[in-house]
Image (cartoon, rainbow, N blue to C red):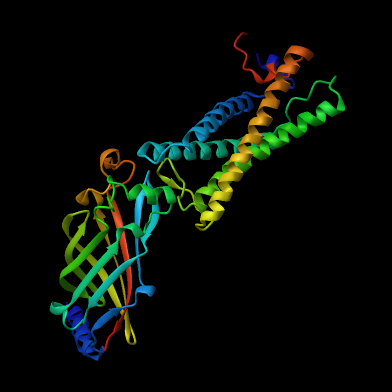
Amino acid sequence: MHKLIAILTTGLAFSPLVQAAEFNHIQTEKSTLGFVYKQMGVPVDGSFNKFAAQLNFDPAKLNTAKAALDLDVTSIDTGSDEGNDEVATKAWFNSKAFPRAKFESASFKALGGNRYEVTGKMSIKGRTQTVTAPFTLTQQGNSAVVDGAFILKRADYAIGEGSWSDFGTVANEIQIKFHFVANAGK
Amino acid sequence: MQHRQQLNFSNRYTSTAMSLHWLMAVLLVCLFAVGIYMHELPLSPWKLQVYSWHKWAGVTAFLLVLARLAWRFSHRPPPLPINMSRSAEFAAHAGHALLYILMVAIPLTGWLMSSAKGIQTVYFGIVPIPDLLAKNKELGKLLRDVHEILNFILAAVVIGHIGAALKHHLIDKDDVLTRMLPRFKR
């Protein structure tokens, strides 16, 4: 117990040494937004190729931190051309009616070390749900690398309706993986 | 009983060889038919299921052909009838060699194709088969064509194989066909 307190206080003692900075400029070309879905038990990689992300994140001021994501649903790459055509249909994203998906943060929580957690509202296909995603933020000089992942349940957003609603073929759980590089701005 | 089996040994295939031969025959016909059927299907849960079944059956065929090769290298098959011409003997050996090569090459190209297309093969949805190639769309299309062409070559060689067996039985009236047939009467 004493050891634990010692470690914790050492950690606290060192934290002011970390340069306080607000990371507020996402380097889109260095950032990626990917996902992994399971079909017939097989994990398959996909990605969103067009998105805009905003970040205002100072590890020392979590209560004013903000993150927002606006992604172009038509930029999805499911790994195959016929898959990409399929997910644009009404049963999946209905991307004609709902071309964009959005995330807006509500709060951040420190999990210790460089680990944090963001909670916010995710809107896809006209449906909004609260999601929580853990992430790490690694400072590299003037920039920070944000890496995180969370599970999104496609049924919560009616992604894959009708014959696709059976989770035996395409699983309900979709892993969303984000990798953002953000600079500390001027 | 023991004595009788020994007497017949040299003229007939072992029950192991016969089982593998006929299991393989049924499996290859099914795989071929399913392969022709499935690639025209519009994307649907059914298509994903059929593709998975085809891959699982293909892995099974690959394992069976390895077992057959092991049998073939550890057992001398019954000799060809002595009255066959040199060219007919050559055709028989070449035909069999080609069948073995195709039975190995076809599942291999299927496996490579799955890897190149970014959809790993997971045997029965449980056992992941390692990807041999990184994802590459163009290579995936090329391997798809190779897989298809090899299958049509196999179909032609199998037709030749059946034709030759029938010629031995009906015209030459030798035991080449019957020694691969299980004997139901005593």
Q: Residue at x 33, y 57 (%)?
A: A74
Q: Is residue B119 left or right of residue A56?
A: right
Q: Residue A126 appears in which quarter of the rendering?
A: bottom left
Q: Nearer the viewer, residue B154 or B177?
A: B154
Q: Residue at x 27, y 46 (%)?
A: A90
Q: Quarter of the image containing the N terminus of chain A?
A: bottom left
Q: Is residue B154 left or right of residue A83?
A: right
Q: How many marks?
A: 0
Q: Considering only vertical position in the picture, is B156 above or below A138?
A: above
Q: Can residue B14 be seen here?
A: yes
Q: Residue B185 appears in which quarter of the rendering?
A: top right
Q: Considering only vertical position in the picture, is A37 above or below B46?
A: below
Q: Nearer the viewer, residue B164 or B130?
A: B164
Residue A147 image point, x, y percent: 31, 70
Q: Residue at x 17, y 65 (%)?
A: A120
Q: Is residue A156 left or right of residue B21?
A: left
Q: Residue A135 appears in which quarter of the rendering?
A: bottom left
